[in-house]
Image: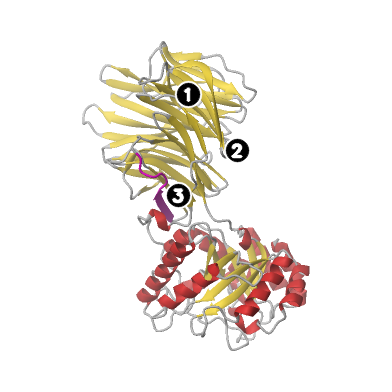
Amino acid sequence: MEHTPRPRALVSAALALALVLAPLPLSPAEASWVSAPVTATVSAGCRASAAYADSAFDSAGVSRSFVTWYGGTCPSARIRYATQSGTRGAAVASPYYGAVLGVADDGTTTWLLYRASDGTRVGGRTRAGAWKTSVRVTTHRSGSGDIAAVGGRWWAVWSEASGSLASIYNARTIGGTTGRTRITTLRATDTHPALAVTPRGVAFLAFARRFASTGRREIAVFRKATPSTPWSLKYQTADGDNHEPDVLAASDTSVTAAWRHGTRIHMTTNRTGSFVRRAFATPGSRPRVAASAGRYVFAWTKAGSPSEIVLAERSSNVTVERTITSRATTARRAAAVGSRNGNAAVTVLTTSSLQVVRQVRPSVAAFGGLGTWVDRLDYGLDPATTVAAMKARGVRTLYLQTGKFDQSADVIEAAKVGRWLEAAHAKGIKVVGWYFPGYGGYLERDVRRTLAIRSFRSPAGHRFDALGIDIERRGAATTATFNADVAAHLRRVRAGVGSAYPVSAIVQSPVAMKLAPNTWAGFPWATIGTYADVVQPMGYWTFRSDCATNPAHCPYAYSRDNVILARSYTGLPVHEVGGIHTEPAGRVVTDQDVRDFVRGTLVAGAIGGSMYDYRTTLASYWDDLASLN
């Protein structure tokens, strides 16, 4: 971000589109999010020889489960209804007995599909605590099944065996009451059905199919456009040895499925128009899938270690995997996964308890809304009066430079930095400290000085709310060395600050990077997506002098596309940095330019925006910039 001498200029005009990296296996301890300690536990009060459970997570993030513990020291197969929220877990005995096959929640009722002594049944519990009358959907005691619910009605699917073969059946009240109806008719063994139904009644069905003639095991995904139309095949594997699917409907046309292929977990989604298949790095079994806020999450039981649960997160082109439970002697499995506001929760089942483990990521609140920038060249400004003016103009976050690779101290003018911190916090303004690394031989210093932001304290004990890394100087490093240094810097900073502290990556404009693909080939976007929490593109549309002939380089499109690309490459929230006011090319910045910058930033869904920097932001810009709030 730092530009010298004035007038401020983008350090390099030769930028290029970075390569989007494939998902990488990641060390769990290095991810930018962690799993919280178990937040709510329901105890069986006995030690079972068998346990069955499934959960649905409501819009408030409450886990609503049905669970059966039986055998061992457990007296009966009575099913319990459990709710888990925050640190509280509670359970009550239901009137149902048997093995839980599937659970769904429609906001008013938690529905249950279970295997009873006389067949397979549907029951449920309303929010008022009333039990639904159990309905038998088949006399067959199914070994696998699932249920979905919308608007107070349900749709159940299950597998029924006949000799060496098995077929998928269904019954529903969604779209009208329909009793037991056969779905699949091939000479095959169809088992482990998973069902997802959208609010409009579009259904997606995934199941495992073993072909009698070849012994091959495949996963099929069907779609039903309305309850009254036929099922149609949308996807099927063709490589054998596929098992245990789960399915998620993101929309009426978009579906995501996860399953076990051999010992590896695979997933496919058609959310970009065609099905794309991926494999996760950590082997395991019985995957579960959920999504929210553009993040898809997958949970499964780790192969060779039934006591450990893996949570994987995929957003745009970035995948992060980590083990979220510690190794224990008691076998555990992921019974369900849910997601709310981009954070996941996993229901973990053992033979004596039902637990919820929640994903926790650093808050990105410091990067939301309108920000402004102060670098070391602006330290002559008086913190108290400057911060008061910032507050009056609607600034929510001050981005304050703390260091640079070629300065003599880890924190430049520490006393002045402390005054900035205290003045900003006194006005309710958050402060993000940012560092300008040198790379190319400066890595050790770069890491130390970046970590100095996290450990800094003002005389009154004030701390920075977050830190940012200004990734732009290449020095004499080759492209490969620069990319490696950036990746190593981010990994070591994340390890040093821990998983709870917010980190931003301040990067060159993704749009401008298209101009020199060889220069920026292999830029570590995926690493940024793994170890940072926010990405801040330096979308300096003022540097582009061809707006009149190239609309993509005008403030609106330039800002919009930077946000879209940065989020796509990293899967992270974006704070767009516009400006800068004066450029060597002599581009004159108008109030309309600023309005277009703000509009493009907001249209693309950025969480915040700013212009570089405070001292050169004209008074006439601030009313429009305040719209970023």
**Residue 380, percent from left and from top:** 68, 85
Give yes or no for contact between labels 3 and 2 (Cβ–Cβ under 8 Å).
no
Secondary structure category for the residue under label 3 = strand
Q: Is residue 470 visible?
A: no
Secondary structure category for the residue under label 2 = loop
Position of the N terminus by quadrant: bottom right
The residue mark sitting in front, 1 or 3, is 3
Residue for badge 3? 313
Q: Residues within 10 Å of mark 1 (few under 14, many from 20)?
A: many
Q: Which residues are magenta?
A: 318-328
Secondary structure category for the residue under label 1 = strand
Against 97, is 551 above or below? below
Taking the spot 72% from the left edge, 80% from the top edge, the residue there is 382
Calculate the distance from the C-alpha at mark 1 to the C-alpha at mark 2: 22 Å
Calculate the distance from the C-alpha at mark 3 to the C-alpha at mark 2: 20 Å
**Residue 294, percent from left and from top:** 53, 50
Q: Is residue 326 magenta?
A: yes
Taking the spot 78% from the left edge, 69% from the top edge, the residue there is 392
Name which quarter of the figure residue 162 lies in: top left
**Residue 441, percent from left and from top:** 39, 81
> Which amino acid type corresponds to the residue marked 2 in the rendered image?
Ser
Number of numbered callouts drawn: 3
> Which amino acid type corresponds to the residue marked 3 in the rendered image?
Glu
